[in-house]
Amino acid sequence: MKRLDITGLENIDRSKPILFASTHANSFYDAIILHLVFKRYVYALARGDAFKKPIVAKILSCIHMLPVWRITEGRSNMAKNAKTFDHCNELFKQNKQVLIYPEGICKNQTSLLPLKKRGTAAMAFRAWNEGTDVQVVPVVLTYDSFKKFGKRINLNFGKPLQKESFDLSEEISFSKDFTATLAEKMKPLFSFDFKPVGFWRNVLHYFGWLINFPLYLAIDAFVKKKFGKTIFSDSIWFGVMYLTYPLYLLLLIFGLTRLF
């Protein structure tokens, strides 16, 4: 990532629990960006089938990922969502932050996809009815590239949805009104006006690339071969880098000490 530009942080009351309702254009990379922005942990919902293998589920849990199952992943798994939503509700009561993707699908999109009427609305309805003053914050992430290394990203936060704006007496009508309002708040947040990187940022970027290019090229070749045609390539690239970089630095330092 060469540049990250953020707007709308002033809209967020960081003393309250937050439900981030975000676009989902770039798999786990979207959650990583929000983790970088906030000091408080962001508990992110992720597709349930990623948690099928116990070791992967443990790793994802360690980085505050929570499983949410879609009907396409099997009707028998849908009952597991109740446990995840109960967990999220407890997190709100503890003043935590949760990230959900109301579009219900990850796609390299450049405009808002239709929002699901469950999930985000159900979580807000329950929290507000139980007296938890959770902020529902619209979020839109846009990328200048989904495949290129050294991308520019715009991260825009909208004004939170307030419980006073909705009738909380009946869930079905609430879900319809809430989802329509959320969509209207998210649409104006799309921005593809990416700012120039600037001379010094470019210098630092290419200096880092020069030092680390053996690892970069190896990861790039692996990810392109195995995952190049999927929406997960960016996330897997980052994950492999995260896991291998400490070892690479140790090898680099060892090699330099032997050389000099």
Image (tube, rainbow, N blue to C red):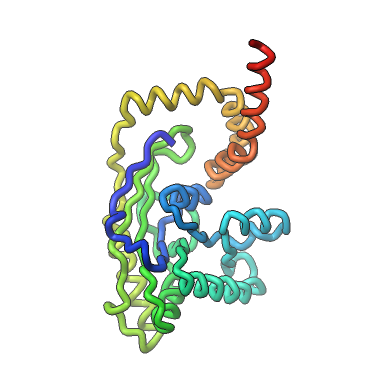
Question: Vertical placement of 237 versus 94: above or below?
Answer: above
Residue at 31%, 43% in the rendered image: 192
Q: Tell me the quadrant of the picture where the C terminus can be found.
A: top right
Nearest the eye: 21 or 258: 258
Find residue 152 and report its horizontal and vertical position in percent. Answer: 38, 38
Find residue 181 and report its horizontal and vertical position in percent. Answer: 30, 70
Q: Tell me the quadrant of the picture where the N terminus can be found.
A: top left
Q: Residue furthest bottom?
A: 169
Judged left or right of residue 204, residue 198 is left
Nearest the eye: 22 or 72: 22
Question: Vertical placement of 41 versus 217: above or below?
Answer: below
Choose top left, top right, bottom left or bottom right for residue 4.
top left
Residue at 49%, 57% in the rendered image: 41
Q: Residue furthest right?
A: 54
Judged left or right of residue 146, residue 140 is left
Find residue 167 and report its horizontal and vertical position in percent. Answer: 31, 84
Question: Vertical placement of 216 versus 46: above or below?
Answer: above
Find residue 55 and report its horizontal and vertical position in percent. Answer: 72, 55
Tag count in the figure? 0
Residue at 37%, 65% in the rendered image: 15
Residue at 59%, 66% in the rendered image: 72
